[in-house]
Amino acid sequence: MEFDDDNIENEEQELGDDFDALYIDEDDAAVPDLLSKKDCVIFAVDCNPQIFQKQEGNPNNESQFNTVLKSIQSFFKSKIILNVDDKVSLIFYNVDKTSNLLSFNGINTVYPLESPSAQMIKDVLKLDQNFEQQFGFRNQKVKLYEVLWLCNHMFQSKDRKRNTMRIFLFTNDDNPPPLQERQQCIHQAKLLAEMDAQIELFPLPNAHQKFDLRKFYTEIIALDVDEINESLIDSSEKILDLQNRLRQKEYKKRPINRLLLYIGKDSIVGTKVYCPYIKVRKPFPKYIDQASNKLLKKTTKNICSETGQILYPNQISQCIILGGEKVRISSKDVQKMKHFQEPSMTLIGFKPLSQLKVYHNYRPSYFVYPDDFQVKGSSQFFHALITQMKAKNKIAIVRFQPKRGSQVRFCALLPQEEAYDEDHVQQPPGFYLISLPYSDDMRDLTKVVQHEEKVEVNNNLINCAKMICNALEIHNFDVRNFEDPGLQKFYAHLQAHALNEISPEETQDLITPDEEGMKKYEEILNLFQEAINLDLKQQFGG
């Protein structure tokens, strides 16, 4: 069981709406906005002649280069719509014409590190049309460490505490460079890692030869925890799914909190808390001046209802009415009343797994992962604890306070071992944090639900229902295959408006029932309806 640690210091926390429900009290007057990091991505594309050859088995008869450009264009579109403050850049290497800040031969900076523009998105696909005249092909291979060096130089002006820095490397060449260049590549990769810049490889294999990462690239890239499997090492079909892979990497996975887990008085374990699912919502609109098209700044002023004077924060306090009089309570007093302990998790004990019921999970659950950056040895502790809890079918009960002033809750830690499914998707090791209800949260429904006499159904109707369930069963159902049609349509229209396109892209509603496919089971549905009618006649006559 292996744990991956991102070692990001002072990382900004991201909160979703579901996270707010657990981590922020409902009576909080205001919640401060937490700034998320800006994303800086450099696309480095290996432009050797083989990447321009038509692909066998490609449904559109495209070259690998054209597929890469389409994927990059899709990435640029998402950035210009979702977060225009993010920065992107495009670099071609192994080309004849040189243009870059460090004057390295064979490297051309097509787009510098800047916010994507509508013109950039329109022009990126045109780079394939006159490539030989505009960039040319190079006979001698470019030194890969110079590409990494250039990326490092481009990242130097960015604050790593405010930006996440990533290099997306596209290549179909898995052959290692000469020994001296290899050592320099490893050195440049270490320098990038020291500034929290991540190299992510997108291998481009051909139909006759697989891309083998183990020859060289495992020495310079940090493999994603979701991709450490044979699916990435043997990536003969990855080019066909390139756009989906890029979409998955649009947002870097970040912990929403880092807490210490106390085991007794003397033992402490570092943890990171992740949110497995966050509801994606439409972005909030921003107000602009109609004449100048500039963003407007919204300000709020509090005015006294009795005197009409403007009140400043230090002049405002809360109160409670006792005996007809207003008793003033300062904000510090409110904070003291809410304070129980420092934000942390404290182990209370263990319970059998059978005592954790499905209805206990009445709030969104979260995922707890070890953090060796806070406390060394946390991964080893997690491994031992998960193994023993799974062997004995136990859950852990913890006292949980995510932040100052938030509600203290009892939570269950449900262990999960590392595993891979048939699609090579990793199930990471760790604990699911399940918020347990208090007795006040449990409802007594016996007074609401009226107990009626047991309804008996004849066997003919039961058999018809079984036939419907078997006929309409959805095989290999996975929620990851279904996108929100409302969001897809919204962003398609927004994209068309931003890029001055004539009409928006067509979106496919994947949650629409397959009416054509259901027609072949029409006889079974009619049989079920007849069985219902017959049963009603037998019970009530007629």
Image: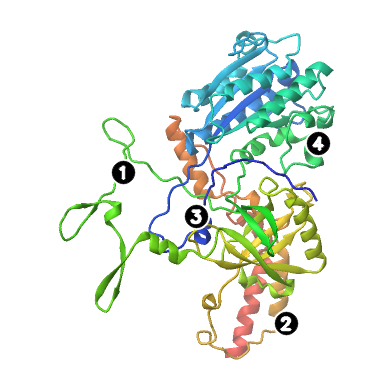
Q: Secondary structure at mark 2?
A: helix
Question: Is 225 situated left or right of 230 in this image?
Answer: left
Please tell me whether residue 411 is drawn above or below residue 199 in the rendered image: below
Q: Residue type at mark 3: give it.
A: Asp
The picture places residue 114, in percent across and down from the top left corner, at: 51, 25
Q: Which residue is mark 3?
A: 17
Dot 3 or dot 1: first in sequence order is 3
Which amino acid type corresponds to the residue marked 1 in the rendered image? Answer: Lys
| Residue type beneath disc 4 | Ile
Residue 134 lies in what quarter of the image? top right
Tag in front: 1 or 4: 1
Q: Residue furthest front?
A: 266
- Badge 2 crowding class, 10 Å Cα cut-off, few under 14, some 14 to 19, many 20 or more, is few
Mark-to-mark CA distance, 3 and 1 = 22 Å
Q: Amino acid at mark 2?
A: Asn
Question: What secondary structure is marked by label 3?
Answer: helix
Q: Judging from the image, what secondary structure is the residue with disc 1 in?
A: loop
Could you tell me if residue 61 is visible in this image?
A: no
Callout 4 environment at 10 Å: few (<14), some (14 to 19), or many (20+)?
A: some
Expressed as whole percent of the image width and height from the top left, the position of residue 109 reads 59, 17
Upstream in sequence: badge 1 or badge 4: 4
C-alpha distance separating marks 2 and 1:
67 Å
Colour basis: rainbow
Which numbered disc covers residue 459? 2
The alpha-carbon separation of the residues under discs 3 and 2 comes to 47 Å
**Residue for badge 1:** 298
Question: In 3D space, how far apart are the residues under numbered discs 4 and 2 (Cα atoms)?
Answer: 54 Å
The residue lying at 67 percent from left, 16 percent from top is 93
Q: Based on the displayed image, in which of its 4 quarters is residue 8 positioned? A: top right
Q: Residues within 10 Å of mark 1 (few under 14, many from 20)?
A: few
Residue 49's quadrant in the figure? top right
